Amino acid sequence: MYNKITPNSQKSDLRVGVFICRCGGNISDIVDIERLKNSIDADVIEEFENLCSLNGRKIIRDNIVNNDLDRVVIASCSPITHEKTFQDYIQPLNPYLMDMANLREQCSWVHNDIEKATDKAITLVNASIEKVKQSQAVDPILCQTPESAAVIGGGISGISAALSLAKQGVKTYLIEKKPSIGGNMVKIGKVFSPVKLAEECGMCLLNPIMNETVWHENIEILTNTKVLNTERRAGNFNILLESNPRYVDEDKCISCGKCIEECPVEVPNIWDDGLSMRKAIYKPFSQSYPDAYTIDMENCEKCGKCMRKCPMDAIYLKGEKEVIPLNVGAVILATGHKTFDPELRPEYGYGRYEDVITQSELGRIMGVNGPTKGKLKMLSKEEVPRRVVMIQCVGSRDEKPDGHKYCSKVCCMVALKNANIIKHKYPDTDVIICYTDMRTPGMYEKYYKHGQENGIRLLRGRPGEVNKKGDSLVVRVEDTLQKKFTEIETDMVVLSTAMEPSTGSQEIAEIMDVGLTEDMFIKETHPKIKPVTTDVKGAYVCGSAQGPKDITDSIMQAHAAASKVAEIMNDGLEIEPFVAEIDDERCNLCEDCISICKYKAMSIKDDKIYIDPMSCSGCGKCLTVCKPKAINIHGNIDEKIFATISGMLKDKKEGEKRILVFLDQVGYTAADNIGVNRVDYPESIYIIKIHSVNRVMPKHIIYALENGADGVFIGEYPGDLMYQEVENKMNQIREEIKEHGMDPERLQFSNVYIPYFRGLANKFKEFDEKIESINEEA
């Protein structure tokens, strides 16, 4: 039988204070606070409505000083969002002599039964009390970061972030996988404003910012370039970039355009949404940067005609991809968005009828730099449409397959903008917007009223289908205000398609292990108190990579992200101290730890083993191979795991079921998301947060099962370097469980992902049912 091992036992008379937050009813509406207070054993027990407030801080600090407290337990919300706040609040105590019992995200928000939720809250607080008694005073590690940053994505948010950083003296690399910076703003023609009724030229606003970015000495622009790999080490991001050749020397090219006169290949121009044609050698748009032509080698016939025509000898048809290493102190993700594919809604006839187009395509048609030079024309014939019907929420607020439940936020305003432009230029053209709900928040309401005064007609109802009748299109729609069905004959239909996460956002999230939301946008650590901050230290997000938003919000978020980068450049990056340390007197420099470390955190430096705190995960793998026992993990982790298990199993009732779930940062965040989205799971699930799943040893699991745990669930993110290691270890642990006369099926190992929190909730339910079946058979 495994026993708790406490080689560094603390004094037995530690004074512990427990501070319970009612969280404005978020906790106290479900958890019986009075019963909770009466059921725990601590030297001080206090409750407060909002413990994270300044008054809450005073209560905590006064009690620490007046009651000589040694340890503190905060029974409130998730440590993911508020741990740093409460670590500051417990001064003058060491920040790591505090633990948080998660009564909100993992109790009151996932359970509805007051009696059972309160029982669980009591257990969670007891576990925190036991754990904090084993905590040691350790100091956080401060890593200085180089004053350089990479901004990934060259749209308006990426450009704005790069320019803001550069002006603060930070060397910035602006990385764009397309041949030019500029992003989606290049294509939209005119833009709307919250305080102006007049629409403004998008390029007129973008060009000065682009020019300033191009000429700033602290900015290096890398186009035709994508990220291959990133590695976080000692306050640095080591990034590998792959740069594709342009096949045109941008230093020699004078953009004379003679090359395109000779090129025989024509393909649809993606910068015009396929509404015009371009050559295989082309310039994305007239004001693009770099101000040089590029060759689309997928469509180039390599005939050499452009080479022979070029007066500057700037063209070459043989080029190799280049791998570029980059070392920076921070990364901003500005990878933008794409739009919903309207062909997924065949009932609207997109791709079947020429005059069914998207708002993006209408923006190109109405743009002065577009295929028709700003003249509104039907695609089927060179005529101004007599009527235009706009259909909102195509792919947004849509629960059909491939649709998105979220609102895309800007579609109503984009439709109003394009409708207003049409009414200004072509007052005789009838414009009807079929909407679900018109959403024009704040100052945009003024623009909405302006559109109505211009004669834009609004019909509440989502059309069912679009068909052809003679030379006209027919939109069938239910007017939900008048409660009748109607058919509208029109010359043109414009679909307001949803904003979706770009493929670039999903790719970079996978490369950097950055969390994604349920909708696959890049996730902020907390949308209220930690906006633009991602789960990866030193990595931030801005613009529509984070979610649907307009240009104004994208620029504001870009400046916020740049500000956060500047903070860590000035103050350094603080990381948790639960990493390995070497006893140099014992170490014999055998280098076994170096060879086994999957995080490459160890190296030889000045004839000693050096451990990079930014790379070390505290997984403990190195401990297993160190023969002289020269390695230790800061923070008394082993003892804290045993203590937490004991607390989770304390006062377990006859017939009660308790399943212990071990999750690291990724898994714990996914579990929090279950609560945030009010998805329930069985009360038997008790979650224990650990720094690395690899730190859960066979002795911990067997100790848990021998002392009353009905099951043990271990979750690991498949992208973690230790995933395979942990997965392989599970079979060994099952054999040990069997040897101790217990059912190995009581242990489950599963992969977890931050976006797929509903799947994690389902796994909890399935494992609970499995354990119930095992218990019945036992």
Image (cartoon, helix red, strand yellow):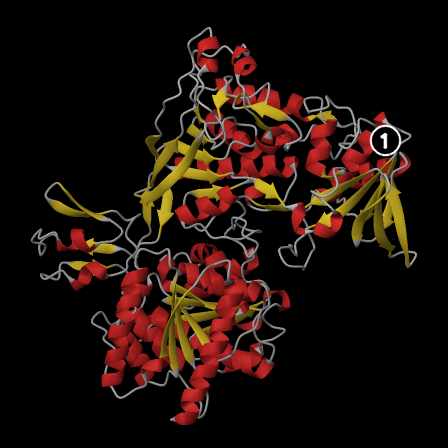
Q: Looking at the picture, tell me which residue is in the foreground, 548 or 81.
A: 548
Q: Looking at the picture, tell me which residue is in the foreground, 120 or 446.
A: 446
Whether residue 582 can be seen here = no
Query: On screen, 767 above or below 409?
Result: below
Query: On screen, 693 above or below 392?
Result: below
Picture residue at 47% right of the left edge, 48% below the top: 534
Query: On screen, 554 above or below 535?
Result: above
Horizontal relation, residue 49 to residue 297: left or right: right
Query: Percent position (x, y) of residue 157?
Result: 56, 34
Query: Percent position (x, y) of residue 222?
Result: 43, 27
Query: Percent position (x, y) of residue 344?
Result: 65, 51
Horizontal relation, residue 771 to residue 606: left or right: right
Query: On screen, 426 above or below 445?
Result: above
Instruction: Say which residue label 1 marks.
Output: 423
Picture residue at 84% right of the left edge, 32% below the top: 385
State the quadrant of the C terminus: bottom left
Picture residue at 67% right of the left edge, 60% below the top: 399
User: Residue at the top extreme?
Assistant: 311
Amino acid at pointer 1: Lys
- Determine crowd level at label 1: few under 14, some 14-19, many 20+ residues with C-alpha closer than 10 A: some
